[in-house]
Image (cartoon, rainbow, N blue to C red):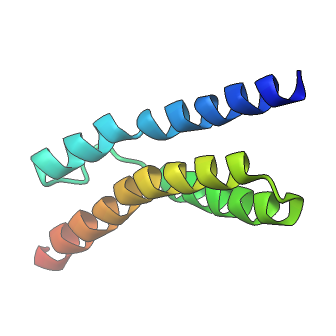
């Protein structure tokens, strides 16, 4: 039963990472940070980094990989938001 829960947990974390992909694509295609909360996505990124560290301490590969995937996708939104915001504010 423990293994089943671990697999379902890992799949859930993978799905969590996939939920950020549409936002990454929207920011990338619009080439704009409009409507994106940097506090929200930055906060998510920090929490995911903490999750990776916690997974390492717990030696939980599902947690490490799931949080790393989420950090990659959410971090992409965060990075693109910072990039386009700096670009936009640099012109003002």
Whether residue 75 sits left or right of residue 88 in the image: it is: right
Q: How many marks?
A: 0
Q: In the image, residue 91 lies at what x, y percent?
A: 11, 76
Percent x, y for residue 46?
Answer: 62, 62
Q: Which image quadrant is residue 49 in?
A: bottom right
In this rendering, would 83 be left or right of 39?
Answer: left
Q: Nearer the viewer, residue 92 or 62?
A: 62
- Rendered residue at 52%/59% (across/down): 42
**In percent of the image, x 56 and y 58: which residue is there?**
45
Give the answer, above or below, for where 16 lies relative to 67.
Answer: above
Frontmost residue, 61 versus 79: 61
44 vs 18, left or right, is right
Look at the picture and state if 48 lies above or below 21: below
Measured as percent of width and height from the top left, residue 30 is found at 12, 46
- Residue furthest bottom in the image: 90
Residue at 56 percent across and 57 percent down: it is 68
**Is 52 or 2 nearer to us in this picture?**
2
Q: Quadrant of the C terminus?
A: bottom left
Q: Give the residue drawn at x 41%, y 51%.
A: 73
Residue 52 lies left or right of residue 65; in this view the side is right
Residue 18: give x, y in percent of width and height.
Answer: 42, 36
Quadrant that contains the N terminus: top right
């Amino acid at each position: 039963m423990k293994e089943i829960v671990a697999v379902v947990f890992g799949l859930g974390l993978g799905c969590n990472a996939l939920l950020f992909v549409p936002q990454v694509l929207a920011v990338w295609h619009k080439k704009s940070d409009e409507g994106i909360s940097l506090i929200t996505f930055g906060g998510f990124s920090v929490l995911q980094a903490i999750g990776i560290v916690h997974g390492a301490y717990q030696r939980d590969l599902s947690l490490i990989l799931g949080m790393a995937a989420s950090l990659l996708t959410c971090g992409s939104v965060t990075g693109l938001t910072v990039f386009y915001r700096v670009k936009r504010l640099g012109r003002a």
